[in-house]
Amino acid sequence: MLYREAGDFKTSYPADNQTFPIKFDRWGYWVILAFAIFVVPFLVNDYWASSLLVPFLIYAIAALGLNILVGYCGQVSLGTGGFMAVGAYSSYKFMTAFPWMDMFTVTLLSGLVTAAVGALFGLPSLRIKGFYLAVATLAAQFFLVWLFNKVPWFYNYSASGQISAPERSVFGITVTGPNTEAWAQYAFSLVFVIVLAWVARNLTRGTMGRKWMAIRDMDIAAEIIGVNPLRAKLSAFAVSSFFIGVSGALFFTIYLGAVEVGEAFGIQKSFLVLFMVIIGGLGSIFGSFAGAAFLVLLPVVLKLVGVDLLGWPTDIVAHLNLVIVGALIVFFLIVEPHGLAQIWRVTKEKLRLWPFPH
């Protein structure tokens, strides 16, 4: 009975309201965090960084942002790919216009630009909701991709229409460009994940998070008790877009290095992040990480098992990946709408009483 709360007493309100009230959870959190910071950078290689770790960290930030909007505020969005493109192209313009600017500032400014764009496209949420809002954000997705394709200023009049990240360093360590080492990519992305996860957790547990959840549960009742729908909805769009913009900037500068907007930030990107949130669990910080980990890990596992071990054709494995993801979405929507986060929550409740059955 290692996982238990017997004897774990609380003597203050802050201790009773902490994120991990059970001591075993806190120990596990600090062990995982210490392992990610002090061990993984010395073990990671190019394959694991490019195929698993860096995309997981970047998609986790995007899933966090979308979960704030969809899971906590109840505003459906299908424009995630377009907002990631805003972050990517903003970082490119900042890097080329201000070569002296450090990468932390570039990434944060790209997030702020995306937050402004997200708040602008969030204005229709004041009058429409549900399916109609989803269509409006889908229109934003197509408009932003068209804009970055058709206006040459965004890609500095390049003949190919692609943008490429110039080489930049942080504290003398190269983090962008072809000469970047795997551990540097991982460490730079990890810094943003840790900080933004802490911000998201505190926002959703504070006054702003309560307002978002009130709007999600019943917007008319929330307005009657004093919640301003204008501020609540636009702040949710802005904060969500900031997270997504940071992930888009990292996706371009750290992970890919060169992108073409239609290929990298098309509608499939919006659905991928939405599926991460659905499978991981709506309204859950842990669910964002679980969904991102699952959908990043699944193609890697299928490739190792299907292609390398069983010798199946790669196109069959790619189609199998789509079939599995679709089946899982249907399964979670029917059987467990709260996703992997709820499964983990129930598992912890069972472990508290183990070996007793109830």
Image (spheres, rainbow, N blue to C red):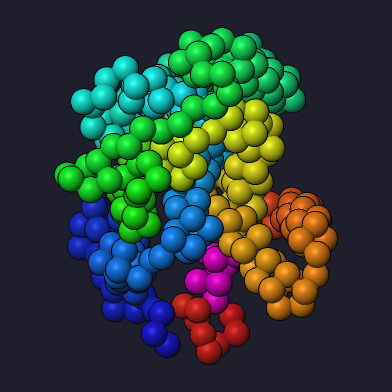
- Res. 243 image quadrant: top left
Relative height, residue 225 to residue 32 (above, below): above
Any magenta on residue 343? yes
Foreground of the two, 302 or 12: 302
| Residue 42, image x, y percentages | 30, 68
Residue at image location 51% in from the left, 85% down from the top = 354
**Left or right of 247: which side holds 202?**
left
Any magenta on residue 225? no
Q: In which quarter of the image is the N terminus?
A: bottom left
Relative height, residue 223 to residue 302 (above, below): above
Foreground of the two, 337 or 219: 337
Foreground of the two, 233 or 226: 233
| Extreme residue toward the front, this view | 159
| Residue 86, image x, y percentages | 49, 23
Badge count: 0
Query: Magenta segment range?
Result: 340-350
Residue at image location 59% in from the left, 27% down from the top = 261
Residue at image location 45% in from the left, 53% down from the top = 54
Relative height, residue 2 to residue 55 (above, below): below
- Asked whether residue 150 is in view, the answer is yes
**Left or right of 345: which side holds 309?**
right
**Left or right of 96: which side holds 265?**
right
- Type of secondary structure dominating the magenta stretch: helix
| Extreme residue toward the left, this view | 171
| Residue 30, image x, y percentages | 29, 66
Foreground of the two, 78 or 287: 78
- Asked whether residue 17 is in view, the answer is no
Residue at image location 28% in from the left, 37% down from the top = 168
